[in-house]
Image (tube, grey):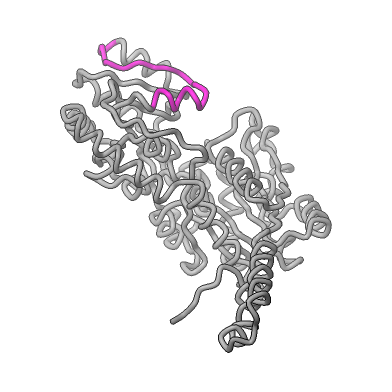
Amino acid sequence: MKISFPTKSLELFLRNHMQNWKAGVFEPASRALLLAKAVLVLYHDTRVKILSIHNFYQSHAPSGEDAVVGNEIKLLRDHGHEIITYERYNDSLKEKGIFFNLFKILPGLFWSPKTFFDLRKIIKDFKPDVAHIHNLFYLLSPSVYDALRSEKIPVVHTLHNYRLFCPGALLMRDGEVCEKCLGKSPLRSVRYGCFRDPFNTLPLALALAFHKAINTWNRKVDIFITLTEFARDINIKGGLNADKIAIKPNFLSDPPEADLHEGSYALFIGRISREKGIQTLIQAWEGIDFPLKILGNGPLLDYLKSKVRENKVNAEFLGQRPFSDVMDILKDALFLVMPSEWYEGFPMVIREAFACGKPVLASRLGGMAEIVKNGETGYHFEPGDTSDLALKAKKLIGNPQDVVKMGGNARREFENKYSADINYKILMNIYHRAIDNRKR
């Protein structure tokens, strides 16, 4: 029988003493002392020093990705790990965009000397066991990898979106899923202006094409993390080595108690923008006599408010709310609607709905179709199809007891896959795998 050890040091320690233990060489007191030493070895070996690296999008408006990074750092610190962070913010790029900040942005896309020397100093002072990268764009650059490799630091990189292959990061163009650059040259994105417009897309596309040509991602990262199996397959299709990709979903700390009861409304939580499928949802709801509440803000808010008034849709816009308010509103919902029309990474609202014991009506697309089990933790509908969305919504509304049963399934799914404890174990296994691989 093959024995699996949680860490390499514990394996070596126990193998060195196992033969004498089996032979009965140790007295009871010595055995107790040996066990205590094994515990100390395990404790010391599992306290990992981590360098967390992240380029924030905007300091005044943290993204979902930014929140995930913060939650993960807190989780690791709560478990006693020592963490130091290296962070940059894209605030200075907000007004003029990338093209008009070329002298500032080009090093951040191709190779940043500032990042390289900053990190070399941090590494020498902190001496991390592993580095965990989240976002590199648009100021950090892949010089991060070179600084880490120069000091033989294992590199783990979480892929929260599809930026390594798509300048727009979403694999979406003109409101539809687009894979034209996947596995091919990103330069074709310039023609379509996939990041704002052609001028802003050009430097991003050039940088991605350059790093693809010299195989930066596969050569310089030990382990990539994707949030779903679907995202893993997409990144393999984009050119990443399959054996370098691990899967770790997002998690929720301190989840609420599941509230399994028949809620009085359907709920949408998210950005009020085209890729989120909110227009499809409003149109589908024109024929549904059941309250729909919409939490969030975004560029389509005023337009959709006028549409709701004009067509007398049974929908209410609640605006942006604090997280605690969002969870309270979610607890009283019958189900959550997730009508996104892009591939999504790992929608945190699905995780939150599951934690509250609420099923999800989701687009049969990307990771959403993987996370939500059709008929068990919710229903799927064809993305962008108002008739199918309305049909499945009415099915849920007309069978509230089945919805409560699905909510119980959703809560169990959360406990089995998306709790902080489960996530921590997955993350530590990834770190130790990266560390052990680098030692070979």
Residue at 49% across, 67% down: 241
Q: x and y percent of residue 361 in the render?
A: 28, 36
Taking the image as drawn, is residue 440 in sight? Answer: no
Taking the image as drawn, is residue 333 in sight? Answer: yes
Q: Does the magenta stretch include residue 312?
A: yes
In which quadrant of the rendered view does residue 71 lie?
Answer: top right
Residue at 60% across, 76% down: 11
Q: Is residue 221 left or right of residue 186?
A: right
Between 61 and 1, the one nearer to me in the picture: 1
Image quarter in which the C terminus is found:
bottom right
Residue at 66% across, 68% down: 36
Residue at 61% across, 37% down: 57
Q: x and y percent of residue 401 in the render?
A: 19, 32
Q: In this view, does 296 lie above or below 83?
A: above
Q: Is residue 68 above or below residue 81?
A: above
Between 325 and 193, the one nearer to me in the picture: 325
Q: Read off the magenta span.
A: 310-330
Image quarter in which the N terminus is found:
bottom left
In which quadrant of the rendered view does residue 125 lie?
Answer: bottom right
Between 357 and 292, the one nearer to me in the picture: 357
Between 107 and 271, the one nearer to me in the picture: 271
Q: In this view, does 335 lie to the left or right of 187?
A: left
Q: x and y percent of residue 26 in the render?
A: 65, 82
Q: In this view, does 289 lie above or below 271?
A: above
Q: In this view, does 161 lie above or below 273?
A: below
Q: Does the magenta stretch include residue 16?
A: no
Disc count in the image?
0
Q: In this view, does 97 lie to the left or right of 159?
A: right
